[in-house]
Image (spheres, rainbow, N blue to C red):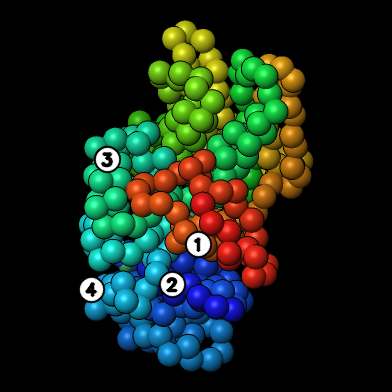
Amino acid sequence: MNNTIRVLQWGLGAMGSGMARLMLEKPGLEIVAAVDNNPAYVGQDLGQVLGVGRDLGVIVTDQPETVLDKANVDIVTIATTSWTARQMPDLRKIITAGINVISIAEEMADAEAQNPELARELDDLAKQHGVTVLGTGVNPGYVLDYLVIVLTGGCHRVTRIEASRVNDLSPYGPTVMETQGVGTTPEAFRKGVSEGSIVGHVGFPESIHMISEALGLGVDRIEETREPIISQVYRETPHVSVEPGMVAGCAHTGVGYRGEEEVIRLVHPQQIHPHLENQATGDYIHIFGEPEVHMAINPEIAGGKATIGITVNMIPHVVAASPGLKRMIDLPAPAALMGASAYARKV
Ligand code: NAD
């Protein structure tokens, strides 16, 4: 394929390594560099880190300055953290090197929602250096915002939106178990929420802001609540065990108000092994107004796979886009990269 897009993968954890593996399948993409600060990866060939059974001729480095060269790299995909402020030093390096970037940090899905000053800095810096910066991911970035917005496309008017994502946390590692409070007592859960160690889902302010902005719903206040999902049965994963009466997950709700009126309600109960209590997973979107729209996807769109997919699939759009900080709603619709025409679409 002509004009192969050259990618630097930054962060080789669960998501970043999955992105890199998917890119290897795509003839329009070439991985030319990889950055991670995990000492177990630094100095290794990327192929060994990814476990693909062959060397790729790309050595993982923890010195990004040595590989951030716009003569060799068209775009960085970065999967390191959830927080915009924490990612800023790395984003500044990428942008000032004149290279496009896609971040899956949850707060980057709509950076303006919680970090308006950083969003302005990113937008100014990106325009100054002629590059595009996109935040995406399965959620925020897709299921509880982009899909909601697209489903209102035929509506004459929208009075209220309610959407939920019921998912299974079982595949995730120890960090997710801790930040969701899985395996704690209900008392420890409430203490963790009040102290900020149990955060539940990261992304409701971003999703609500994105929906409100796209439709012009005028949300002026967002409230979030986190409740423990108390298990009636024994549940376990390789990282945590939950006795009956203990916490199997976090039922997190975000509500956007315009004045006193509720206009957007997003609900995200996340727990390990929901099927043990006959809870099916799924994504549900209800749009009230004219006409009403009701969508149900069963089971849930697979979170890890879809984050990897949407990031890789957005690469050509980001490379082709005008400079600046973008959200999913600012770029052409995501589509699986299956053949030449998918790489050729321009903004
Ligand atoms: P992970 O912990 O498995 O991997 C993170 C990797 O980044 C590790 O290899 C670590 O060594 C590396 N790293 C961290 N900071 C770095 C830095 N400054 N420079 C170089 N390397 C660095 O995490 P993951 O599961 O791959 O997820 C990555 C982030 O993406 C998490 O914060 C997660 O919450 C977020 N995420 C967002 C979405 C979404 O829908 N928006 C979906 C999935 C994951």
Task: Name the residue tied to disc 3.
Answer: 120
Secondary element at tag 2? strand
Does 15 sit left or right of 108 as displayed?
right
Instruction: Name which residue type carries label 4.
Output: Glu
Q: Nearer the viewer, residue 244 or 330?
A: 330
Ligand 1 quadrant in view: bottom left
* Callout 4 secondary element: helix
Identified at 46% across, 77% down, the residue is 31
- What is the C-alpha distance between the residues marked 4 and 2? 15 Å
Among the two numbered marks 3 and 1 on one chain, the one whose residue lies closer to the N terminus: 3
- Residue 65 tag number: 4
Q: Secondary structure at mark 1?
A: helix
| 64, above or below 177, in the image | below
> Does the residue at mark 2 contact the one at mark 1 (Cβ under 8 Å)?
yes
Question: Is 336 on the left-hand or right-hand side of 50?
Answer: right
**x, y percentage for residue 32?**
41, 80
Lower position in the chain sequence, tag 4 or tag 2? 2
Q: Can residue 308 be seen in this snapshot? A: no
